Image (cartoon, grey):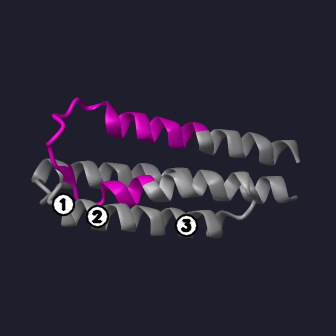
Amino acid sequence: MHSIIWLAIGIAILTVLVIILMTRAKKKPDEKQPAGTYIGMGIALGAGVGVALNNIPIGVGLGLAIGAALEARAKKDGKIQPMTEKDKKMQKRWLVIGLLVLLVAVVMYFLVRK
């Protein structure tokens, strides 16, 4: 049981780091966000909440719904910019990082389950 707590703490720390990295870039108040920013933050926060509640699918689903709602509102307000080449490279990098974190979480789950 202690391993699950440490896994939850690790995922929570990773979620906070992702949010800090995403918001660290100094932006002007009217500067537009890249597409998918709000959905990504919603999923990351939802995964952390899901681990804390011991029901990851519910947390990810809620995070996705909240992120999609925030994304739709930002798009309606004209605060979403089209993806540039730099954004596409960053997206690929974060995809690889996310998949590695997912792989570590799955391996940890099977190690803890035994």
- Labelled pair 3, 1 in contact (Cβ < 8 Å): no
Residue topped by disc 2: 73
Residue topped by disc 1: 77
- Labelled pair 2, 1 in contact (Cβ < 8 Å): yes
Q: What is the C-alpha distance between the residues marked 2 and 1?
A: 6 Å
Query: Residue 51 is drawn in which quadrant?
Result: bottom right
Give left or right: position of 13 versus 100.
Answer: right
Q: What is the C-alpha distance between the residues marked 3 and 1?
A: 23 Å
Choose the circle earlier in sequence order: 3 or 1: 3
Residue 70, how many percent across, how many down?
35, 61
Give left or right: position of 61 versus 4.
Answer: left
Residue topped by disc 3: 62
Is residue 93 or residue 53 the one in the foreground? 53
Which contiguous range is marked in magenta?
13-41
Disc number at residue 114? none
The residue depicted at 25 percent of the width and 59 percent of the height is: 74
Q: Crowdedness of circle 1 by 10 Å Cα count: few (<14), some, many (20+)? A: few
Q: Is residue 35 above or below residue 7?
A: below
Is residue 105 or residue 15 the one in the foreground? 15
Q: Crowdedness of circle 3 by 10 Å Cα count: few (<14), some, many (20+)? A: some
Q: Is residue 76 above or below residue 20?
A: below
Nearest-to-viewer mark from 2 and 3: 2
Nearest-to-viewer mark from 3 and 1: 1
Residue 1, how many percent across, how many down?
88, 48
Residue 18 magenta-highlighted = yes
